[in-house]
């Protein structure tokens, strides 16, 4: 049994794939298996995978018809044999000591999960303080822990971004979580990624949100987590719901449905919105969203807030100019 399984789903990322694979195959911990799942790529990703498979005997190559990111990740989970496992997206990369240092921390702390730092397009590295926005690629996971919760999988019905719910559920089910400031996951942004600022993606995101709320309700009820994890859940919702609400072009009907989905979820499950720790602008904004009686009231409040910020900036500008008159 290898110490670590590295799962890499692949779909038309030939442009970045070799850089990704180089970062994984050059890890300072050698006892790893690398599982490549080619999800029906139409570029030369398969050619690159086969080249690396021939060079590295610890690479396992799986080719399938296009079934989506969630299914590819689940295939990787089912194929992994390592004591621990981690994910790397095929257009990203990891620092050379990521796996070795994460393995050491997991073993020494007996953790189910080790969280690594995130570097977004080489701008900065950040180790999160809370876990409301952690992607699965930042998580170094004990396989026996995952196997003890077999129903936590990536949801194949989600039309895009199956990562959020999986990551939240995994983090909600255990307190044995450690951090690794020595490991860095390098996340790449590029033009081929789907933009959330287009009208075309709005209906897909709304479809996802319907699944999110249904899945979260079933998961929290089954695992009796409502009271224990209320603060974590509120934090998760604040980051994900309000982010998409503010960064996507919705029509009026879609805005109304998002408003109702969120408010009905809170009311039905008797969540206390005041448990939300308002320690950043996103959480404050979501709290106002929940306190509003209708989405139009919320948007008017946002307008007033933005106007007030601009007004104060203008006053400061004129005051500074006055100093030199």
Image (spheres, helix red, strand yellow):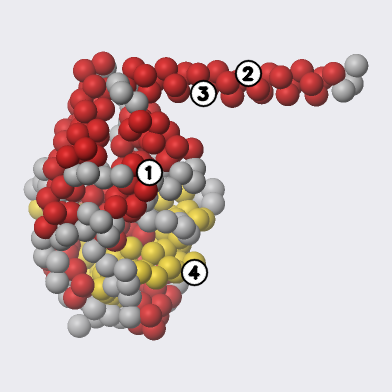
Q: Quadrant of residue 110?
A: bottom left
Left or right: where 90 falls relative to 160: right
Structural distance between the alpha carbons of marks 1 and 3 = 21 Å
| Quadrant for the N terminus in the image | bottom left
Q: Nearer the viewer, residue 27 or 71?
A: 71
Determine which residue is flagged by label 1: 274
Q: Quadrant of residue 80?
A: bottom left
Q: Position of residue 99 (x, y in %)?
A: 38, 72
Q: Is residue 103 above or below residue 189?
A: below
Q: Earlier in the sequence, mark 4 or mark 2?
A: 4
Which label is found at residue 173?
Answer: none
Determine which residue is flagged by label 4: 182
Disc 3 to disc 4: CB gap under 8 Å: no
Label 1: how many Cα within 10 Å (few below 14, some 14–19, many 20+):
few
Q: Earlier in the sequence, mark 2 or mark 3?
A: 3
Q: Earlier in the sequence, mark 1 or mark 3?
A: 1
Q: Earlier in the sequence, mark 4 or mark 1?
A: 4
Q: Nearer the viewer, mark 1 or mark 2?
A: 1
Structural distance between the alpha carbons of marks 4 and 1 = 35 Å
Q: Position of residue 6 (x, y in %)?
A: 27, 67
Element at label 1: helix
Q: Is residue 294 above or below residue 221?
A: above
Question: Which residue is painted at 21% across and 72% down in the image?
Answer: 145
The answer to whether one can see residue 102 in this image is: yes
Q: Nearer the viewer, mark 4 or mark 1?
A: 1
Q: Position of residue 324 (x, y in %)?
A: 89, 21
Element at label 3: helix
Q: Earlier in the sequence, mark 3 or mark 4?
A: 4
Determine which residue is flagged by label 3: 305
């Amino acid at each position: 049994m290898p110490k670590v399984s590295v799962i890499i789903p692949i779909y038309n990322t030939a442009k970045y794939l070799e850089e990704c694979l180089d970062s994984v195959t050059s890890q300072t911990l050698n006892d790893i298996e690398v599982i490549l799942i080619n999800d029906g790529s139409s570029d030369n990703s398969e050619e690159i995978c086969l080249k690396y498979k021939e060079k590295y005997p610890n690479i396992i190559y799986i080719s399938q018809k296009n079934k989506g990111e969630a299914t590819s990740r689940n295939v990787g989970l089912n194929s992994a044999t390592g004591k621990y496992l981690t994910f790397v997206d095929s257009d990203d990369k990891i620092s050379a000591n990521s796996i070795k240092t994460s393995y050491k921390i997991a073993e020494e702390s007996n953790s189910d999960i080790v969280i690594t730092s995130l570097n977004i397009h080489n701008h900065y590295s950040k180790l999160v303080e809370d876990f409301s926005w952690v992607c699965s690629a930042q998580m170094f996971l004990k396989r026996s822990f995952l196997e003890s919760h077999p129903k936590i999988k990536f949801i194949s019905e989600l039309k895009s971004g199956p990562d959020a719910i999986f990551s939240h559920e995994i983090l909600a089910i255990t307190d044995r979580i450690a951090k690794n400031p020595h490991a860095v996951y390098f996340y790449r942004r590029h033009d081929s990624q789907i933009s959330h600022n287009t009208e075309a993606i709005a209906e897909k995101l709304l479809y996802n949100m319907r699944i999110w709320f249904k899945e979260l309700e079933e998961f929290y009820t089954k695992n009796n987590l409502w009271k224990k994890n209320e603060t974590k859940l509120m934090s998760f919702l604040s980051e994900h719901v309000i982010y998409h609400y503010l960064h996507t072009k919705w029509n009026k009907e879609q805005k109304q449905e998002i408003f109702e989905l969120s408010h009905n979820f809170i009311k039905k499950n008797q969540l206390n919105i005041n448990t939300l720790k308002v320690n950043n602008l996103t959480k404050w904004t979501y709290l106002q969203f929940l306190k509003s009686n209708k989405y139009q009231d919320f948007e008017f409040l946002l307008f007033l807030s933005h106007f007030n910020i601009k007004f104060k900036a203008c006053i400061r500008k004129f005051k500074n100019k006055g100093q030199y008159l």
